[in-house]
Image (spheres, rainbow, N blue to C red):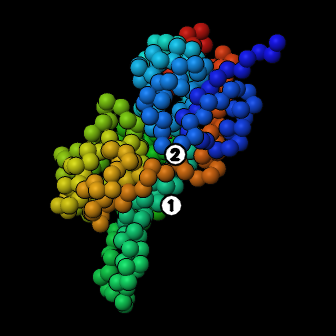
Amino acid sequence: MAKKKPLVYVTRKIPTEALARLHQRCEVLLWGEELPPPREQLLRDIADADGLLCLLTDPIDETVLKAASKLRVISNMAVGYDNIDVAAATKRGIPVGNTPDVLTETSADFAFALLMAAARRLPEGERYVKAGHWRTWSPMLLMGQDIYGATLGIIGLGRIGQAVARRARGFDMRILYHGGSNAEAAAVLGAQQVDLATLLQESDFVSLHVPLTPATRGMIGAQELRLMKPTAILINTARGPVVEAMALYEALKNGEIAAAALDVTDPEPLPADHPLLQLENCLVTPHIASSSQATRARMAHMAVNNVIAGLQGEPLPYCVNPAVYPDKP
Ligand code: DGY
């Protein structure tokens, strides 16, 4: 009798080729809707699953894990995994996988695109033209901030922070950083380590590249925003709750800083009537920094590789809780 294939619950449609590979090896229960599975649905669907391929929009907590008595692997199709209670998974011996590296350059491209768009006021310019306001060349029309030669403050000089710094070098920027320190990489990049207050006070652009943890939640609030220059621009491609949304709103409205460009928000998605969306100087995109066709395909393949390895009892190629493998060096 043929061996029964393991069942993998996939919480959304993922790029086709990777999904096809999963179908070849496993029974797949796919939640095919546009929005994430509602909580009750997730709890029902996970009950018989041997593996879970989930997204950053799926909270995988103690209750979900309790409902998933057969679960042997969790694979998040994202580098960040703040949606997963990793400690609870580790306690149950369940490995958790993520998708680092493959999205580094694509995400850094996007962070830099946001920086440039906000600095040079691209969204405002486009809105102005499309609204039919463009009547002549004007000496002071939509004046923005220079990027070349400016000071960039990177909070979190990890993989993506370093990739942003590499782009900044091409613009002759002075680079400061705080956190995620890798002295060797910083030296190569000519990035100077400073305390948070100095970074906020001296930077023309502040770009966030920290994971969401209890220590980074709300790390940019009213007090931090007040330290920034009135001409400064804040870029967030990390996680929304790193910035206190209403403090940012006040700072932008009162001219404490010049602009913000956010690919991540709190809450996410931002409701259409949220105060931040009423501001001309706040550019918001829908969490798409890693969304190039090639990168999302690579992320999906990595997520599938993690699931398959977990189901075969092998160490995940990218595992965030190696403590589940006590025998591995
Ligand atoms: C991640 O991977 O954590 C990003 O936020 C989405 O690509």
Asked whether the viewer can see residue 144, the reply is: yes
Tell me residue 4's x, y (percent). Answer: 73, 17
Residue appearing at x 28%, y 56% in the figure: 273
User: Looking at this view, is 132 or 303 the one in front?
Assistant: 132
Residue appearing at x 50%, y 41% in the figure: 159
The circle drawn on residue 34 is 2
- Residue 141 in the figure: left or right of residue 108: left
2 vs 1, front mark: 2
Tell me residue 270's x, y (percent). Answer: 34, 50
Secondary structure, mark 2, is loop
Q: In this view, does 300 lie above or below 281?
A: above
Q: Name the residue under label 1.
A: 170
Residue appearing at x 28%, y 40% in the figure: 219
Residue appearing at x 43%, y 28% in the figure: 40
User: Looking at this view, is 92 or 326 the one in front?
Assistant: 92
Residue type at mark 1 is Gly
10 Å crowding of disc 1: few (<14), some (14-19), many (20+):
few
Residue type at mark 2 is Glu
Tell me the CA gap for discs 2 and 1. Answer: 39 Å
Q: In which quarter of the image is the N terminus?
A: top right
Asked whether the viewer can see residue 120, the reply is: no
